[in-house]
Image: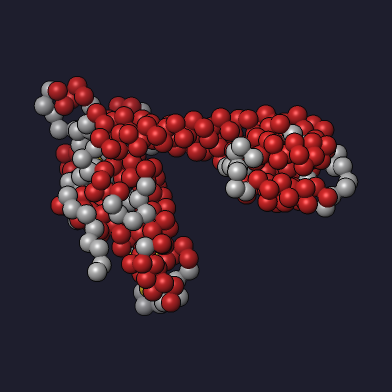
Amino acid sequence: MAVARDAGCRVAYLPGLTMRRIADLYPGEAKTDARDAFIIADAARTMPHTLRAIELTDETVAELEMIVGFDDDLAGEATRIANRLRGLLTQIHPHLERVLGPRLDHPAVLALLERFGSPAALRKAGRRRLHSTARPLAPRMFERLIEDLLTALDEQTVVVPGTEAAALIVPSLAGSLRAVLDQRKLLEKRIQELLDEHPLSQILTSMPGIGTRTGARVLIDVGDASAFPTAAHLASYAGLAPAPRSSGSSIRGEQPSRRGNKQLKRAFFLAAFASLSDPASRAYYDKKISQGKRHTQALLCLARRRVDVIFAMLRDGTRPAVAS
């Protein structure tokens, strides 16, 4: 792309799914590079509306894209390790998993599992050693955490087969999860530094609910919104525009779109959820709930509504209006 731009060529791409559907219009079933190249070139000539423009990416956004992509990979890895860890705890001690499982993202919990990786080791350590391990990492909640942990240990006296093997695996998984979460914290710090350097970051993060990671994702995929003629185009690109479904006179309605940029849709959804502490967002969410929408449906409606505001902010370089 850099070479093409340097030569003065306009750069665009044909999405893979669109290309496959266009390919069905051509005779033959062969799948070769030459045929694909012909279909792409012919689509660019006869159906230019199917192409997506690729805008020039500045240095800050290029670095953001690389770091955020790696951060997304680490997030998936953290989820995988946490699920594996919770599965092991459930297998050997369900009561212990009920207490520690939802708190696996806390460093104090990981420190306890890394140091005392089995129910027997936790029980043998005693309250005093458990306190000394958890206190530096959880000064406000360590007493309640240890109390809940000891109560859970007392609720099961049977040693389940496989507990000794799990005692070798749990500390390793806890250490791996801690390392991944620590790495994500370092990446978040760098992402924030890059956001601070971008001229649109302050405008974007002034929107309630948009934080470091969601703001970075919007900047990467949307930029200054110049690639989208209207907010509706942006909503469609993000997969937030409802898809009408109708057949005859009996089937009429709308369904959530399954297309669009999944990562951008997730960022808009998470930002909408985080914005529920904002009075205006909460009022709109409650309105949708009162209309019979379920929680997820109401959040998607809120995310779609907020796309209009975000689009206008990025297009005009203004911050959201604050209700008096």
Quadrant position of the N terminus in the picture: top left
Q: How many marks?
A: 0
The image shows residue 305 at horizontal and vertical percentages of 30, 63
Nearer to me, 42 or 11: 11
Left or right: 108 in relation to 236? right
Return the residue nearer the eye: 305 or 147: 147
Horizontal side of 171 relative to 199 (left or right) equals right
Above or below 63: residue 285: below
Residue 283 falls left or right of residue 76: left
Residue at the (75%, 29%) spot, across then down: 168
Q: Is residue 23 visible?
A: no
* Residue 276 in the image, given as x and y percentages of width and height: 41, 62
Residue at 61% from the left image edge and 37% from the top image edge:
136
Residue 196: image location, x then y, percent: 28, 38
Hey, which quadrant is residue 114 in on the image? Answer: top right
Up the image or down, 105 lies above or below 318; here it is above
Quarter holding the C terminus is bottom left
